[in-house]
Image (cartoon, rainbow, N blue to C red):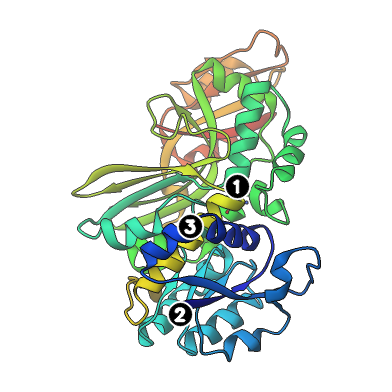
Amino acid sequence: MISIGVLGYGTVGSGVVEVLKTNQESINKKAGQEITIKYVLDLRDFPNDPIQEKIVHDFDVILKDDDVKIVVEVMGGVEPAYTFVKKSLLAGKSVATSNKELVAKHGAELLKIARENNINFLFEASVGGGIPIIRPLNSSLTADEIDEITGILNGTTNYILSKMANEGLEFGEVLKDAQNRGYAERNPEADVEGYDACRKIAILSSLAYGMQVDYEDIYTEGITKITANDIKYAKKIGKSIKLLASSKKIDDQVYAMVAPFLIGDSHPLYSVNNVFNAIFVHGNVLGDAMFYGSGAGKLPTASAVVSDVVDAAKHLNRNIMSFWSSRKLELADISGAKRKFFVRIKKDKETTVNQVLFLFENVQIIEIPELTEEFGFVTPIMTEALYREKADSLKGILNMIRIEE
Ligand code: HSE
């Protein structure tokens, strides 16, 4: 029998308890032994919940109990999660976590401690909710040099953008709905400003490229400026708007960014809607691979956490995770990245179609009959720097969305 301690009885913590209860028999079979929750750490009490008999308020109770071989950290945030996880690993306990802030910031160090102690620091649930992506990158795609990871990595924003597109609603009208469904972070700014997706692409990139990618270095834009009018243009040109998190290796330089993109129906991420996440991976020998599934929510995330518990139980004294060096990977400046840009602009005496044609040359002009005060255009492929330079000389730009082809 293996005893585990769960740190945090919030959405994911209660999901872990539920998953272990629902699938107890098959989970035990797969782990090769019985897995029991011995403690649940939380500041609160839950008097009407059977979990109450396992609730402890002091982390040291879990740390000092040698029966506890696996610690599940589902508290979120860097502290006190980091201190608790580090102490657990140093005490010889494997850790399974869903905490992307923790992994993005301290992953290299925690993986190293786990390796030195012949135990495991596992974090399948930190990216893509219930989608297996960490395990494939760690143990399946090992024959490849990964040169691209592009994903829809945030369920909340994908849900919001899908609902805006389907129902013609404005951003603010759908945010509440996503929060009520339990997809959003405690502070939804982390979702809508792209910070959550940024941490997730930092984790995937660190794992794929074997070096520390600092999330602070990743250019990040959220979806708060996307309007119902942007979506009308997107539909007119047969594209959808998605918050993409990507890192691409081009000529040995890694370009990473998070931003809303217009993508066409031939793009593998075009049809990924609602709370679903998907991650497109390109390897130099594999070619393309796609991972798709439930990207947020209590049970999908808990499913990934429990799969790590099973893996940790099967490999109690053997480290199975690749680790990335704490040496920082210097990202390329995105101003050199090339692409097309979609721009919406106010129509007036100072900004005319002719002026735009003169400045950008081969543009595709897009007009929406009911939007009489503005027009849109798609630029030719150019660098971010050149786009900026030209856009700076135009008055009345309402929005710019990059195009991924
Ligand atoms: N808030 C996150 C999302 C939860 O919406 O994707 C899963 O990490």
The image shows residue 255, relative to residue 167, as above or below, that is below
Dot 1: few (<14), some (14–19), or many (≥20) neighbours within 10 Å? Answer: some
N-terminal-most mark, 1 or 2: 2
Residue pictured at 63% horizontal, 63% vertical: 13
Q: Is residue 135 visible?
A: yes
Q: Residue at coordinates 20% horizontally, 58% vertically from top-left?
A: 143
Which residue is the site of mark 3?
A: 304
Residue 109 circle label: 2
> In the image, what residue type sits under mark 3?
Ala
Circle 2: residue type: Glu
Under circle 3, the secondary element is helix
Mark 1–mark 2 CB contact (< 8 Å): no
Closer to the camera in the image, 251 or 244: 244
Say what amino acid the circle numbered 1 marks.
Glu
Position of the N terminus, as image quadrant, is bottom left
Residue 395 in view of the camera: no
Q: CA distance from mark 1 to mark 2?
A: 28 Å
Q: Secondary structure at mark 2?
A: helix
Read off the residue under disc 1. Answer: 221
Left or right relative to 397: residue 269: left
Lateral position of residue 310 relative to residue 36, left or right: left
At horizontal 47% and vertical 49% (from top left) the residue drawn is 335
> Upstream in the sequence, badge 2 or badge 3?
2
